[in-house]
Amino acid sequence: NRDELGQILATYSTRVASGEWRDYAIDHLPGIAAFSIFRHTHETPLYVVEKQQRYPTEKPKFTLRDRNKILCKGSSMQEIISYFNRLPRLITG
């Protein structure tokens, strides 16, 4: 959905501007859309945001994963974005 993509891209843009993230990829599988975030282009994703919705009438489920585990689950993209905002940030000086 366009609003959800806008939310994740706004967060992504902020982190790119601060030098924390560098690249992203969007993947689609049956019933799943994934937004992967990379620190460096040729690495494994730092984070993956997944939206799972098998049927149009089913409520979507959102999951945030890092390289090793599930960090957050929610019923809206805003819940995932809120979790991102609580994560430690790279400080440059």
Image (cartoon, grey):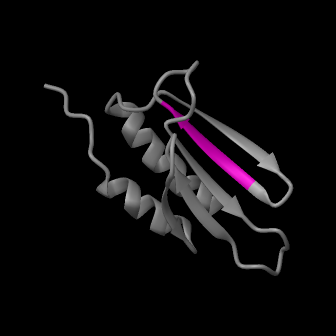
Say whether residue 1 is visible: no
**7 relative to 61 in the view: left or right:** left
- In x, y percent, where is residue 69? 51, 50
Residue at left offset 78%, top offset 79%: 58
Say whether residue 4 is visible: yes
- In x, y percent, where is residue 24? 58, 34
Residue at left offset 13%, top offset 25%: 93
- Tally of numbered discs: 0
Which residue of the protein is positioned furthest toward the front in this rendering?
A: 68
Q: Is residue 54 magenta?
A: no
Which residue of the protein is positioned furthest toward the left in this rendering?
A: 93
**81 relative to 3 in the view: left or right:** left
Q: Quadrant of residue 36?
A: top right
Span shown in magenta: 33-38
Q: Main secondary structure of the magenta part?
A: strand
- In x, y percent, where is residue 31? 82, 61
Residue at left offset 60%, top offset 64%: 62
**31 relative to 11 in the view: left or right:** right
Q: Is residue 37 magenta?
A: yes
In the displayed structure, 73 sits above or below 86; it is below
The image quadrant where one finds the N terminus is: bottom right
Report the front residue among 58 and 15.
58
Residue at left offset 76%, top offset 57%: 32
In the displayed structure, 2 sits above or below 91; it is below
